Image (cartoon, rainbow, N blue to C red):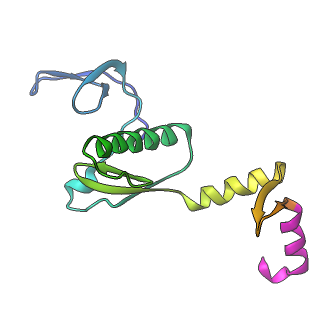
Amino acid sequence: MALKSNISYNERKDKVTGFVTDGQSTKPEYAGHAQVFMIREAGFIVVATVCDQGANNRNAIKLLLQETRGAYLRTGREPKQNVFVINEQEIVHIYDPPHLLKCVRNNLITKNLAYIMDNHAKTAKWQHLELLLKENPGYR
């Protein structure tokens, strides 16, 4: 969630707020964004997260996965793919399906997709989808 950068003094807590913090330590940088974690406090159990493929989101998920993998390996456990752990709760991350479809569409418009099927090299092209819609107008 975007924030307007602002520094303020909380008299009751005798604390200056508005700097970047992870809850444990504070950096000498003005906070411009917040991550909201009120769901757990309301009694929900978080089992999955969903976001688009923005650079900040990808980096955050990558860091969470790396930290969890390291913790698993240090304790002799087999790391699970695409699972990170927060407060002993395993959480699966999912990239937002509509954004993934949009990304595939945008890439197919400008590039071809090479893949292997039944041990044969194949190519998927945007033109294939255009042809499919032309020959099957009911798909619209």
Q: Is residue 33 above or below residue 20?
A: below
Q: Position of residue 16 (x, y in %)?
A: 21, 20
Q: Is residue 39 above or below residue 62?
A: below
Q: Any magenta on residue 137?
A: yes
As drawn, the residue found furthest toward the bottom would be 138
- Nearest the camera: 46 or 13? 46
In screen coordinates, is 63 left or right of 139? left
Q: Quadrant of residue 100?
A: bottom right
- Nearest the camera: 74 or 88? 74
Q: Main secondary structure of the magenta part?
A: helix
Q: Any magenta on residue 108?
A: no
Q: Is residue 124 above or below residue 5?
A: below
In screen coordinates, is 121 left or right of 42? right
Which contiguous range is marked in magenta? 127-140
Quadrant where the N terminus sits is top left
Q: Position of residue 66 (x, y in %)?
A: 40, 40
Question: Which residue: 86% across, 74% down?
Answer: 132
Q: Position of residue 62 (x, y in %)?
A: 46, 41
Q: Position of residue 90 (x, y in %)?
A: 31, 56
In screen coordinates, is 59 left or right of 111? left
